[in-house]
Amino acid sequence: QVVKRVKGLIGSLLSEEEIASELARAQQLRLEFRASTGQELGHEKLWREFVADLWPQDAREKVVAHATELTYAWANRPSWTMIDGVAELLEFTLGTGMPVAVVSNTRCGQAHRDCLERLGLTGAFAHQIYSDELGVCKPNPEMIQAAAQALWEAPAACWMVGDKESDIAAAQAA
């Protein structure tokens, strides 16, 4: 979807295969940048300095002008579904008054917000923290600290459920 949208913006300046290759290259550069700095890229910087940095200026300017829309398309997965047990877990937390926050490394938090809305889950979360919006990514403890602050709790009073080493490192550092 994002490749076709970029192609529509830049025309014949690059082929779809070249665009897909550049997106893969940019994803690797983004991961390296995040690992070395603990920072997350804003949408314009992602497209200007990581995706289209080697492109002709005209093509670069076109995608940067549509950076948020393109980043949303790149991050959005209409196939996202809820895994077994999550509905029951969220019913439990809501029923006991336990606030839950999402803390996620992502290119586009809005894509995740829209997914939670589509799945009918938005109301189950007291707050949502996304790396592209905060400007830092896990394992930077600022993400956990921001969520704890939004929940009016000390980080030590919170539980962290995650699936990556960076989740554990962020929680421990917070």
Image (cartoon, rainbow, N blue to C red):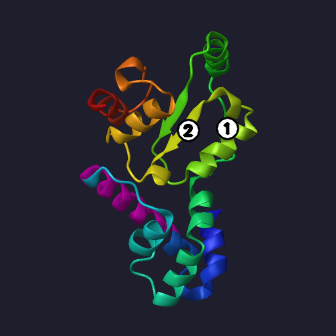
- Badge 1 marks a residue whose secondary structure is helix
Give the percent coordinates (x, y) of residue 139: 32, 39
Residue 148 relative to residue 166: left or right: right
User: Is 5 placed above or below 135 here?
Assistant: below
Q: Amino acid at mark 1?
A: Leu
Q: Which mark is residue 116?
A: 1
| Boundaries of the magenta span | 20-36
Residue 36 relative to residue 18: left or right: left
Give the percent coordinates (x, y) of residue 74: 57, 58
Q: Which mark is residue 128?
A: 2
* Discs 1, 2 touching: Cβ within 8 Å: yes
Q: Point out the frontmost of discs 1 and 2.
A: 2
Q: Residue at x 67, y 16 (%)?
A: 91
Q: Residue at x 38, y 24 (%)?
A: 154
- Badge 2 marks a residue whose secondary structure is strand
Whether 57 is among the magenta residues is no
Give the percent coordinates (x, y) of residue 86: 62, 21
Cα–Cα gap, marks 1 and 2: 10 Å
- The answer to whether residue 25 is visible is yes
User: Is 169 placed above or below 105 here?
Assistant: above
* Quadrant location, the C terminus: top left
Give the percent coordinates (x, y) of residue 35: 28, 50
Q: Amino acid at mark 2?
A: Gln
